[in-house]
Amino acid sequence: MNQPLDFIGIGVGPFNLSIAALGSEVTGFNSKFFERKPHFSWHPGMMVPDCHMQTSFLKDLVSAVSPTNPYSFLNYLVKRKKFYRFLTTEQRTVSREEFADYLDWAANGLETLEFSQDIRSVDFDDQQRQFVVTTQRDVYRARHICLGIGKRPKLPDCVSEQNDRCFHASEMSLRNPDLSDKRVTVIGGGQSGADLFLNIFRAEWGQPKQLNWISRRNNYNALDEAAFANEYFTPEYVESFYTLSDSAKQRMLTEQKMTSDGITSGSLLAIYQAMYHRFEVLREKPWAHLLPSRSLAAMHASGNGYQLVTHHHLDQGKETFDCDVVIFATGYQQDRPAFLAPLANRLLTTANDEYRITPDFTLEWQGPSENCLFAVNAGMHSHGIAEPQLSLMAWRSARILNRALGRDQFDLTSTPAVIQWRSQQAAVTAQAAHDAIFNFN
């Protein structure tokens, strides 16, 4: 049996990597982070050409709370000997490839990460007051656990198989399909769908015979990048959002969808210009089609391909599309990991069967309050539109570490918000509730 740890992170994606990076500067903090994959990788299947981040590179693993931490993006540029050349590019955001290289660089520098560790179970020893984590290698004990396993690809209910002709966008670069002379359909109207459509249109995987882009949305909507919309991605807004009623939260999440799930203006313009050049300037017979306002109703195997049946939201029309390859850019969904089964009866959930999460990202559970089961990327319903995004990961990591350490290791105080999000009466009530929670803890 190993010596008990202060903290175990399960899953090594950007969010737990951020906690590991910040934790590396805390003297005496004994932690391990387990990942079942043999090495670090971040969405390797989505590394397509000309695909840029929607988030500033300054919103990296650590800089928002500890800019002198050695795992900042600026230090990465210095260590990679490209600081001055990077400045000359005048980039506001970086490519997904470069940000993935930054994350890999950080992962390779951290000694607390362990790969090829498959989690079998997580339980709690009430007598010792320790979480018990069992992997295929060993049994580990810790005062605190953090779930950072990410989400699994989401596919329509009518999709019964995945292969080289039918797959999720997250596998695009891994499958590297030959789309030459193929009838291709991309389903999903967000940024991933736009990136795939543009690269397929440019014949990145061979010149297709036909290309369709189907979306449930009524148009190909631009990302809302306005200054005040970006205030949704600040600690002050998250703290205000948390105090709203569940119904108000749901209304706001619906209203704010395009602040995180829209398509960058640059991508939309590039698609429009590319189609204009091929079909208006070169006068090619149109072989690419934009098809919004449609949901996939059915999908049938047809020869070596598929027949798609769609329902039009506005005119109620039914259409069929024959295609050789179907790629689903349909996002991701939360998974309940099987290894949490021993704790399932102790985890409290909402009326919608979602985790009940406190302001500092601990799951509410029937156990000692001094033992925390944290979760990252699991609380959009409680913390708002920023929760699944990279924008606030350093701030969230610092909140988690402050709670785990039982002290304010990281200074998270801030100046007043630009926007007054709550009424004065509600703000006073929320502050009192906040103080009661933290005084109790």
Image (cartoon, helix red, strand yellow):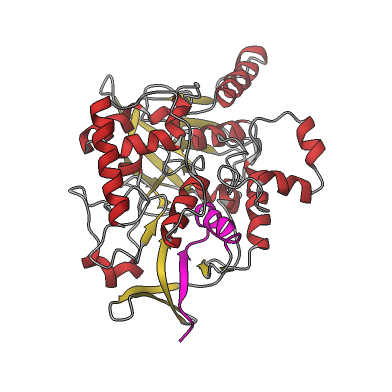
| Residue sitting at x 36%, y 75% | 130
Residue 229 located within the stretch drawn in magenta: no
Name the residue nearer the viewer: 199 or 350: 350
Q: Nearer the viewer, residue 1 or 100?
A: 1
The residue located at (43%, 28%) in the rendering is 417
Horizontal and vertical percent position of residue 58: 62, 38
Quadrant location of residue 141? Answer: bottom left
Q: The magenta stretch spans which residues?
A: 1-26
The percent position of residue 422, horizontal first and vertical second, equals 30, 27
Residue 408 as seen in the image, left or right of residue 66: left
Whether residue 250 appears in this view of the structure is no
The answer to which quarter of the image holds residue 1 is bottom left
Q: Report the front residue among 414 and 33.
A: 414
Q: Position of residue 220 (x, y in %)?
A: 45, 24
Q: Is residue 172 above or below residue 364?
A: above
Relative to the observer, which residue lies in front, 244 or 164?
244
Residue 3 placement (x, y as % from top left): 48, 82
Q: Residue at x 34, y 67 (%)?
A: 371
* Residue 8 falls within the magenta-colored stretch: yes
Q: Quadrant of residue 89?
A: top right
Q: Is residue 245 visible?
A: yes
Viewport quadrant of the C terminus: bottom left
Q: Is residue 361 left or right of residue 199?
A: left
